[in-house]
Image: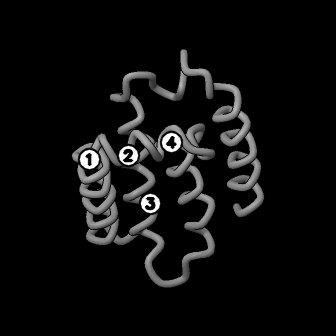
């Protein structure tokens, strides 16, 4: 793993998350849309699944996925527990777990 690229991926995901949180008027509309069940950790898991296909910079995806999964711990409802979208988010996680296992 290229540590420099992993740090860049981690920082980029952090910056994207900061921008997301800086505009609640816009992001709240997106969070009410059809993909409202997608959580940080779902995106992180998707990046892990894609990482095996990334030929040039897989460490960028490693860093970004690490940030997204870890940042989920600091959400109001970590891993969607207590949200009406919990079941949908859990099903996405199960699907992504299978996808990750299939790419290894």
Q: CA distance from mark 3 to mark 1?
A: 26 Å
Image quadrant in which the N terminus is located:
bottom left
For image coordinates 60% across by 37% down, the residue present is: 37
Tag 2 and tag 1, C-beta contact below 8 Å: yes
Crowd rating for badge 3 (residues with CA inside 10 Å; few <14, some 14–19, many 20+): many
Q: CA distance from mark 2 to mark 3?
A: 25 Å
In the foreground, 19 or 11 = 19
The percent position of residue 36, horizontal first and vertical second, equals: 56, 40
Mark 3 lies on residue? 62
* Residue 39 drawn above or below residue 55: above
Which of the 4 image quarters holds residue 34? Answer: top right
The percent position of residue 3, horizontal first and vertical second, equals: 30, 66
Tag 2 and tag 3, C-beta contact below 8 Å: no
Determine which of the numbered discs, if any, sits on residue 41 in the image. 4
Determine which of the numbered discs, if any, sits on residue 23 in the image. 1
Determine which of the numbered discs, if any, sits on residue 27 in the image. 2
> Would you say 3 lies left or right of 56 here?
left
* Residue 46 drawn above or below residue 97: below
Tag 4 and tag 3, C-beta contact below 8 Å: no
Q: Earlier in the sequence, mark 3 or mark 1?
A: 1
For image coordinates 42% across by 68% down, the residue present is: 59
Q: CA distance from mark 4 to mark 3?
A: 13 Å
Q: CA distance from mark 4 to mark 1?
A: 20 Å
């Amino acid at each position: 793993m290229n540590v420099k690229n992993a740090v860049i991926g981690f920082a980029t995901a952090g910056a994207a998350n900061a921008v997301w949180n800086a505009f609640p008027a816009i992001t709240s509309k997106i969070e009410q849309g059809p993909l409202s069940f997608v959580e940080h950790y779902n995106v992180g898991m998707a990046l892990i699944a894609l990482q095996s296909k990334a030929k040039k910079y897989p460490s960028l995806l490693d860093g970004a996925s690490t940030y997204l999964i870890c940042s989920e711990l600091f959400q109001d409802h970590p891993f969607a527990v207590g949200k009406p979208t919990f079941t949908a988010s859990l099903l996405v996680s199960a699907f992504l777990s299978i996808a990750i296992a299939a790419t290894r």
